[in-house]
Amino acid sequence: DHEAKFPLELPRRAIQLLTDRGDWVLDCFAGSGTSAVAAILEGRRFIGVEIDPAYVRLARKALQDAKQRISQANLDLRLLDPEPSAML
């Protein structure tokens, strides 16, 4: 785990306040990927820079987990909604 990891809600609130859906979020010190996950969950695109290979692996894992949660949530919504076009 990253030594300076912060709660997901912190970057998520900043991203909500300072960007719009589809905007780019740049984190020059990506670390464990918390800002990347927050950006993806808020519908933003993300660029992360990290020089430590261990943290790159940690961030990639965090992003994969977040993408799986999003995919599962979208599937759950489609199962609840009998009208597929309502998801568009």
Image (spheres, rainbow, N blue to C red):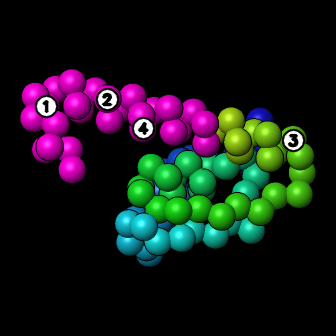
Q: Mark 2 or mark 3, which is nearer to you? A: 2
Ranked by sequence position, the earlier of labels 1 and 3 is 3
User: Residue 77's spot in the image, x, y percent?
Assistant: 23, 32
Q: Mark 1 or mark 3, which is nearer to you? A: 1
| Callout 3–callout 4 Cβ contact below 8 Å | no
Q: For the point 22% across and 31% down, which residue is it?
A: 78
Residue lying at the far bottom of the rendered structure: 18
User: Residue 69's spot in the image, x, y percent?
Assistant: 45, 32
Q: For the point 41% across and 56% down, which residue is it?
A: 42
Going by the numbered disc 1, the residue's amino acid type is Asp
Going by the numbered disc 4, the residue's amino acid type is Ile
Q: In what quadrant of the picture does the N terminus appear?
A: top right
**Separation of disc 2 and disc 3 at Cα?**
32 Å
User: Label 3: few (<14), some or many (≥20) within 10 Å?
Assistant: few
From this view, report whether residue 72 is shown above or below residue 84.
Answer: above
In the picture of the structure, the residue carrying the numbered disc 2 is 75
Ranked by sequence position, the earlier of labels 1 and 4 is 4
Going by the numbered disc 2, the residue's amino acid type is Leu
Q: Nearer the viewer, residue 14 or 30?
A: 30
In the picture of the structure, the residue carrying the numbered disc 4 is 70
User: Residue 23's spot in the image, x, y percent?
Assistant: 47, 71
Please state the extent of the stretch shown in magenta in the rendering: 63-88
Q: For the point 60% across and 56% down, which residue is it?
A: 35
In the picture of the structure, the residue carrying the numbered disc 3 is 54
Ranked by sequence position, the earlier of labels 2 and 3 is 3
